[in-house]
Amino acid sequence: MRYETIFIMARVAVHADHTNLGDIVHEIETQSKLTLSDTAKINILETEILVSGVRNIKNINHGTQPEL
């Protein structure tokens, strides 16, 4: 059986009582759970939540050009 590291990216929208983005990220990284199950030919050995990028919905450009 081969041992491999596979990176899985997930997008998660949240509604939070925190006002600070750092507090939201910290709570997700330390208290949230990610569950993957074994399959017939794959045994899941370890999972970890890694928050590598966040975006503020208020700052998303919805196909419009900024005013110059």
Image (cartoon, rainbow, N blue to C red):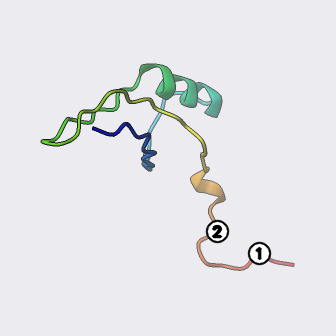
Point out which mark residue 46 bears.
none
Give the residue type that dot 2 points to: Asn
Give the residue type that dot 1 points to: Pro
The residue singled out by tag 2 in the image is: 61
**Is residue 39 found left or right of 33 in the rendered image?**
left
Front residue of this view, candidates 9 and 11? 9
Disc 1 packing (10 Å; few <14; some 14–19; many ≥20): few
Vertical placement of residue 38 versus 10, above or below: above
- Please, what secondary structure does the residue beneath circle 1 have? loop
Q: Quadrant of residue 67?
A: bottom right
**Is residue 66 found left or right of 1 in the rendered image?**
right
Disc 2 packing (10 Å; few <14; some 14–19; many ≥20): few
| The N terminus, quarter of image | top left
Q: Position of residue 13 (x, y in %)?
A: 44, 46
The residue singled out by tag 1 in the image is: 66
Q: CA distance from mark 2 to mark 1?
A: 8 Å
- Please, what secondary structure does the residue beneath circle 2 have? loop
Front residue of this view, candidates 65 and 45? 45
**Is residue 1 found left or right of 25 in the rendered image?**
left
Query: Residue shown at 55%/29% (left/top)?
Result: 24
Mark sitting earlier along the chain (2/1): 2
Q: Position of residue 3 (x, y in %)?
A: 37, 36
Query: Residue shown at 62%/62% (left/top)?
Result: 60
Vertical placement of residue 15 versus 10, above or below: above
Front residue of this view, candidates 53 and 22? 53
Q: Position of residue 8 (x, y in %)?
A: 42, 47
Front residue of this view, candidates 33 and 27? 33
Q: Tell whether label 1 touches label 2 (CB within 8 Å).
A: yes
| The C terminus, quarter of image | bottom right
Which residue of the protein is positioned furthest toward the top in this rendering?
30
**Is residue 44 found left or right of 56 in the rendered image?**
left
Q: Position of residue 47 (x, y in %)?
A: 38, 30
